[in-house]
Image (cartoon, coloured by chain):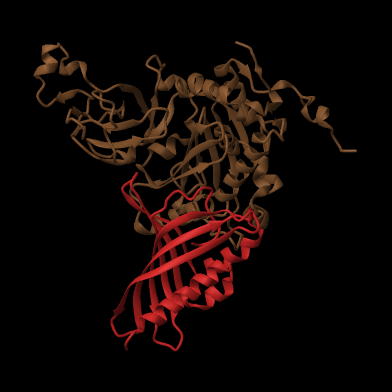
Amino acid sequence: MPSRNRETWERPPDLPGTHFVDAMAYSDPELFEEEKQRILARAWRFGCHDSELPDPFDFRTIDHAEVPLVMIRGEDGKVRTFYNVCSHRGAKLFNDLSGNARTKTCFFHHWTFDWRGDCVSRPRPQPYEALHLEAEDCGLKEVATDSQYGLIFFNLDDDAGSLTNYLGDALSAFEQTLTEEPVEVFHYHQAEIQANWKQWVESNMDHYHEWMHVMLRRTNVITEETLFHRKAELHSGGHITFRGMEIDYEHEGTIAPREQSKAMPGLTAETFQATPLFPNTVLMTRGTVMRIDTTTPLTPDTSLVEFRGLGLKDDTEEDRMVRIRQHNEFWGPMSHNLPEDLFAAEQCAAGYRSGGAAYGIICREENLSAQDDGGMRHFYAEWSKWMGRSASDPKIITA
Amino acid sequence: MAVDKEDIRDFLNKVADALDGEAWDDFLSMCVPEFEYRVTAFSYELNKDMIWLIHDMDGLRSLFNVLPEQLGRRGTRMLRQISVTDVTQVGADGRVDVTSKVIVVRTSPEGVSELFAAGRYLDVIDVSEDVPKLVRRETQLDTRELGIGSHVPI
């Protein structure tokens, strides 16, 4: 006799609806399309950091949002985002991933655009003029763009509210770190993973998974005592801050100890904190180095995760090398932890995709401390608001 | 001292075999004590060189010691196909700079092979003794999308 038969396996857990997630939320194609329309097309999403566009006319393309985008720093210092498509015949305008261009000429018919998105030149324009199609009607499609503490966000919704209102005080834990001294991105890599986008977002809120990591088990850098120093602060808008935990690297031979002199502003070298921003970005730090994850849904079953590592712009060569080493130790593509985290997300996805797993349980309550699942519940409460469906029973429209 | 390119090729194939076979002690025995290993890549997003892994001999030993416990699928194999493209003798201290193209194929436990990475090995090899030894290896990756990544040096 199996421990559970089909009926008991598929029966919703005897828990409040806020404390579990239906498999459908991870795998249903229609729900996925709805997420794109109701959440991703309307939410403020992280595009890049200020340091990626240091000079006027610097640009950075974003190829994995629902439409191709390009972010450009104007002559006035302001960053603007445009659909990265020519207004003439739809050809992709900027093909390089980054660069500097005062104007951009489409390769196809040589329409030229400036940093404001205005069309400033069309070869032999007379036939257009005869039809009253003027250059000022041929500018690029601009996308709402704003920044806080050097983090540049875009919003595909023309009617989006302000970024300030969207974020509220969610970035307060990182304000000093991001603003006291100039910060710079020194690491970037992407991973296309076989998992629903929320499964990666969850991994940065599900602290109960810490026991998976061999380096944490071997080194005991997280103890029962340090666990309870961590508290989750639930911000409005579905954003969360986990902070209070300090990691004791000092007495662990297998992990390089952190020097206080290398701590980033407002942090100790042992600080371990994270701020997941709804819907798809997470800021985190291990004291001497910062990381930003951005997760973009590609299909219900595949996601693109961007990983950035950040240090101080004015780092000495020696300090930068320390940050690089400490970044790579846990967070690089060849680190101890990141491949394990990504492996876990893919294995969970395999369970849901196959129809094997029916529900995800997010019911741990530890007074929003230690390994409480409250962060995930807060995320799904926000998800439910945007979707008008509960994550535990998404078949039912609630709003 | 003349450098026999065939010997260099044989040596680098043995190094690749040791890595493919996860014979970590054999690999380390082919390196000098002050060996430095790094994996680098150029980011077109940032327009910057990046270091993705950097270890000395102790760091590599520590990495290899942890590998058996590191989460992953048992039976996943890597195969490094190298092609030596340049051997340059540097000074008279018995060291040579060697550039090789490298293609890494990853095969799943089910036997499905896929290209994992492409790039170059930039090696410094000590050929002053009877047996060559690696002094430095930089694995310069063209591939920057490594899926879930790897715990094993490329």
Q: Report which quarter residue A134 is drawn in.
A: top left
- Of A399 and A10, which appears nearest the observer? A10
Q: Please identify the quadrant where the C terminus of chain A is shown.
A: top right
x 52%, y 63%: residue? B79
Residue A30 visible (yes or no): yes
How far from the left and from the top, in percent, is residue B74?
Answer: 66, 57
x 56%, y 40%: residue? A194
- A12 horizontally vs A177: left or right: right
Residue A365 visible (yes or no): no
How far from the left and from the top, in percent, is residue A381?
Answer: 61, 22
What is the letter of the brown chain? A
x 28%, y 82%: residue? B91
- Of A198 and A373, which appears nearest the observer? A198
Colour applied to chain B: red
How far from the left and from the top, in percent, is residue B56?
Answer: 48, 68
In the image, residue A97 above or below residue B151: above
Q: Report which quarter residue A397 is drawn in.
A: top right
- B52 horizontally vs B111: left or right: left
Seen from this angle, which residue lies furthest right? Answer: A1
How far from the left and from the top, in percent, is residue A191?
Answer: 48, 44
Q: Please identify the quadrant where the N terminus of chain A is shown.
A: top right
